Image: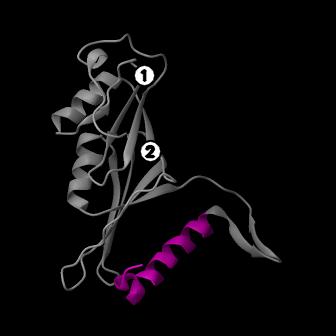
């Protein structure tokens, strides 16, 4: 954990989590915590460049920006995004600001985190939009059903055609995989 979080950010993060718990009806009970109600909130992804990440998740992928909070004391930025019309499954981008000496955190992915997945109305149009934003289609939708891309930080994003698969179409049907997905 970066020193910046230890110097004030942890209290802010704890307050955010406590608010989440209060909204969900979580309370202490003898022998542990009793969950009165539960719902999914978000998946947090650490990013190394918040602006590049916003260009990918918001501009290229098409997620809606729900909120952005720059925390001067904790030296971090939290951005919440969601699919248009579906704010029930949010992605939290966490950006830890560079240290005063300019050094930045680096993150390495693990196989324990697989991918984020989104259903799209037209997988070919979604992939075309991503390409127009300079995103490599790592696993093209050859089957009219599934594609994979990667965020600027290497997070794998799966796109699935909502409903039945579309008929195979070019250039996707003959496009090879590129890199890892």
Image check: 35 left or right of 114?
Answer: right
Q: Which tag, 1 or 2, sits closer to the chain's start?
A: 2
Q: Tell me where residue 76 sits by quadrant.
A: bottom left
To which residue does mark 1 refer? 145
Q: Position of residue 156 (x, y in %)?
A: 38, 44
Residue in front for this viewpoint, 71 or 144: 144
Quarter of the image for the N terminus: give it.
Answer: bottom left
Residue 104 tag number: none
Q: In this view, does 27 lie to the left or right of 127?
A: right
In the image, residue 121 above or below residue 156:
above
Q: How far apart are marks 1 and 2 (CA)?
A: 16 Å
Helix, strand or loop status at disc 2: strand
Front in this rendered view, residue 124 or 87: 124
Residue at 35% of width from left, 64% of height from top? 107
Residue beneath the point at 49% across and 20% down: 163
**Which residue is painted at 23% across and 17% down in the image?**
171
Looking at the image, do the residues carrying marks 1 and 2 touch, with CB atoms under 8 Å apart? no
Task: Write down the residue under mark 2.
Answer: 116
- Look at the image and give the residue range highlighted in magenta: 1-23
Q: Say which quadrant the C terminus sits in.
A: top left
Q: Residue 93, position in %: x, y?
A: 36, 60
- Crowding near the residue tagged with mark 2, few <14, some 14–19, many ≥20 C-alpha atoms within 10 Å: some
């Amino acid at each position: 954990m970066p020193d910046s979080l230890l110097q004030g950010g942890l209290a802010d993060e704890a307050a955010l989590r406590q608010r989440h718990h209060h909204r969900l009806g979580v309370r202490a009970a003898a022998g542990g915590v009793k969950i009165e109600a539960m719902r999914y909130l978000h998946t947090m992804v650490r990013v190394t460049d918040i602006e590049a990440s916003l260009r990918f998740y918001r501009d290229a992928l098409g997620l809606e920006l729900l909120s952005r909070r720059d925390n001067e004391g904790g030296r971090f930025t939290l951005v919440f995004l969601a699919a248009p019309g579906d704010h029930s499954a949010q992605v939290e981008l966490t950006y830890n600001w560079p240290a005063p000496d300019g050094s930045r955190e680096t993150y390495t992915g693990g196989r324990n985190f697989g991918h984020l997945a989104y259903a799209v109305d037209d997988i070919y149009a979604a992939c075309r939009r991503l390409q127009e934003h300079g995103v490599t289609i790592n696993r093209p939708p050859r089957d009219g059903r599934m594609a994979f891309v990667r965020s600027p930080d290497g997070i794998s994003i799966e796109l699935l055609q909502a409903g039945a698969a579309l008929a195979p179409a070019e250039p996707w049907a003959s496009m090879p995989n590129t890199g890892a997905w």
